[in-house]
Image (tube, helix red, strand yellow):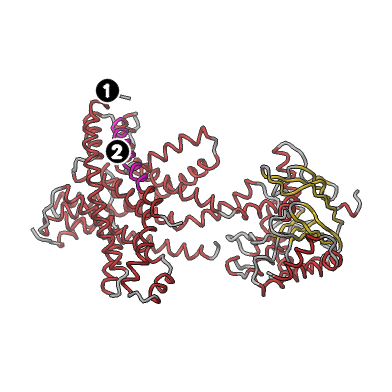
Amino acid sequence: MDIDLMLRVYPFFLEAAWITILLSVLTALLGLTFGALGAAARLSRFTSLRLLGATYVSIFRGTPALIQLFILYFGGPQVGIQLDAFEAGVIGLGINAGAYMTETIRGAIISIDKGQREAARTLGLSQLQAFYKVTLPQAARLMVRPLGVNLNMLIKATALVAAISVVELTYTAQRYIGSTYKPFEMFLLAGVLYMIIIYVTGRGVAWLDRRVRIT
Amino acid sequence: MGLDFTVIPKYLDVVLLGCLWTIAITVAAALVSFFGGILLAVVALYAPAVIRLPFRAFEFVFMGTPLLLQLFLIYFGLVQIGIDLPAFVAGVIGLGLHFAVYNSELIQTAIISVDRGQMEAARTLGLSRTQALRKVVVPQAVRAVIPPIGNNMIALLKDSALVSVIGVSELTLSAQRAIGATYRPFEFYLLAAAFYYVINLAMEWVQRRIERRIAISR
Amino acid sequence: MTESTDFVQIRHAQKSFGTLEVLKDISLNVARGQIVAIIGPSGSGKSTLLRAINDLDALTGGEVWLDGVQVNKQLPHRQYEKHINEMRQQIGMVFQHFNLFPHMTARENVTMAPKMLKGLSAEEADALAKEQLDKVGMLERIDYYPSQLSGGQKQRVAIARALAMNPKLMLFDEATSALDPELVSEVNQVMKKLAEEHMTMIIVTHEMDFAASVCDRVLFMDQGVVVEEGPPEQVFGNPQKARTRAFLRKELDNPE
């Protein structure tokens, strides 16, 4: 193992790790937004909105994120959408993650016992009040762990933007593999950084889950 | 520049061929991941620590890093140690190992969660531990994991797009070839997406049928 | 080779988990064809005692004998495994929660062990399955999966599964406790039928009526010891010990 080489190039990997973190944070925020909207649509009273939500989930979960990214980044200009690689990465991955989070959020909401809502209604709360005061607070607690799984997948999915040349961790590893012919060392550098990011995120999610858990 | 879908027919056969390769790599990698997953699960649950710990480390690394990075390691790493594998084989190994780790997690949980009474009932009839595992516990665990493993296999289909990056001429790379000739990325990536979507729907349909079949015997 | 009263012998059975003693020096002899009920409050050790007979729960002291052979013999691990598997083939057991194999039909549940362990051919096994399932009144459900059966039906299949090994002794661990009240009698009837055929049985139960009408002897256990034992008329009709009386009064007040 070429330790000297690793010591020489690791600052570039560290820099790239910050890009991966930034990508992950922005993608997660966008994904949560789309996930909340998607879940609202899928649980809506209106058939058209439900259909829209279901179509969104089905298409974006049913095709590769890489292809979605390519359509947005390479195909976008053809339909008047000009984005740089980073923007395309955040938006493409965010919409993709949103489709998965839609199902997570919806799953948590529908798993709350109907009796909870009924109990709130018998106290005189409106449907909306019952949702915000009774159903959602319970569902939110249930969401933490599965959303953590979504987040874990999302962090690993940020590697895809290497394919549209965003200089994040995987792209950096790929470039140095090409110039140094030391794939193992480069994998190790990038891999350790990914594992740190994922480990820390996982601990954060576990901490949050413990804090909000009832019983 | 606008959109022009009339360019598609001329390159349809290229993309269709890519489609077949995508199906081939998905099936091959799915088999590797299924049997690899069982092996990893049995090792994780029953092997002595000397064997178990390196396997745990392997699982930890494979679950903690992106598939794309793993593919680079396998493809270029094997070249570095003098093994020049065709990209297709490297892709099957990479995808297969990646999903084997995820399948292993599912299978382990399933084996553990088969009710203790099942083992007891089998032992009461006089079966040995190994016989009880083989006839009673593992068949139930496999039934329990078929739905989530189906989900993993559908995820595998979509992740197979990544092997285009190491040069496997599957659906995504075929679309890129057509784009190289026509400069029509939107049309051909959309076409590729449509094919992925159809394969995905077909897999979901098969999965539902299998689930219905096994529902009664669980 | 053994006295008929010594068909099943438990000698000074002792079992503890850490410092908790759940069985304290229990001895019990059961003659061939005899039916013994074990009653007592939960936590009294009655299930543990039953499960010690086929070594599902190993005793920490004492011996269990069946028909002149020691069940929990001291042997090196490999040999012991072989020995206990052979012993268990002679001891049928029925569980509270049935523990039917959900991935097998009633027929497969009954035939799996005989095929595997006794080398029965497919035809022999099939005939056996029909015979045993007929005996418990489940012949018409022979190709049903457990998920398609009611609790009482599941338990009858579970009894057939145990009987298919042609056991010398049957153990029932609260076989009707998990059943809806209206399903209890179909299982009780099967057990009565076995009694009429002089099957040796040890039954852990909380159904006093059943114990009184079917069993030759009743043991009342509490806190790991046999408080009182005797024929049902005596234990139920004229209990000698205060603890037995207290337990029976409670049971009769709150029949489950």
Q: Is residue C137 left or right of residue B190?
A: right
Q: How many marks?
A: 2
Q: Which quadrant of the structure image shows residue B68? A: top left
Q: Residues within 10 Å of mark 1 (few under 14, many from 20)?
A: few
The spot of residue C66 in percent (x, y) is 82, 50
What label sits on residue A4 in the rendered view? Answer: 1
Give the spatial CA distance, label 2 vs label 1: 22 Å
Q: In the figure, A186 relative to B24: above or below?
A: above
Q: Chain of mark 1?
A: A
The spot of residue C14 in percent (x, y) is 76, 45
Q: In the figure, C193 relative to C108: above or below?
A: below
Amino acid marked by disc 1: Asp
Residue at image mark 2: B72
The spot of residue A85 in percent (x, y) is 16, 47
Q: In the figure, A72 relative to B166: above or below?
A: below
Which quadrant is the C terminus of chain B positioned in? bottom right
Give the magenta-colored segment's residue range: A185-204
**Residue at 24% from the left image edge and 34% from the top image edge:** A13
Amino acid marked by disc 2: Phe
Give B11 or B64, whichever is nearer the viewer.
Answer: B64
Which quadrant is the N terminus of chain B positioned in? bottom left
- The local secondary structure at tag 1 comes to helix
Residue A170 part of the magenta-drawn span: no
What label sits on residue B15 in the rendered view? Answer: none
Q: Which quadrant of the structure image shows residue B117? A: bottom right
Residue A189 part of the magenta-drawn span: yes
Q: Chain of mark 2?
A: B
Give B1 or A162, whichever is nearer the viewer.
Answer: A162
Callout 2 and callout 1 share a chain: no
Residue C254 visible in this rendered orientation of the protein:
yes
Q: Is residue C58 left or right of residue A133?
A: right
Q: Residue furthest front?
A: C242
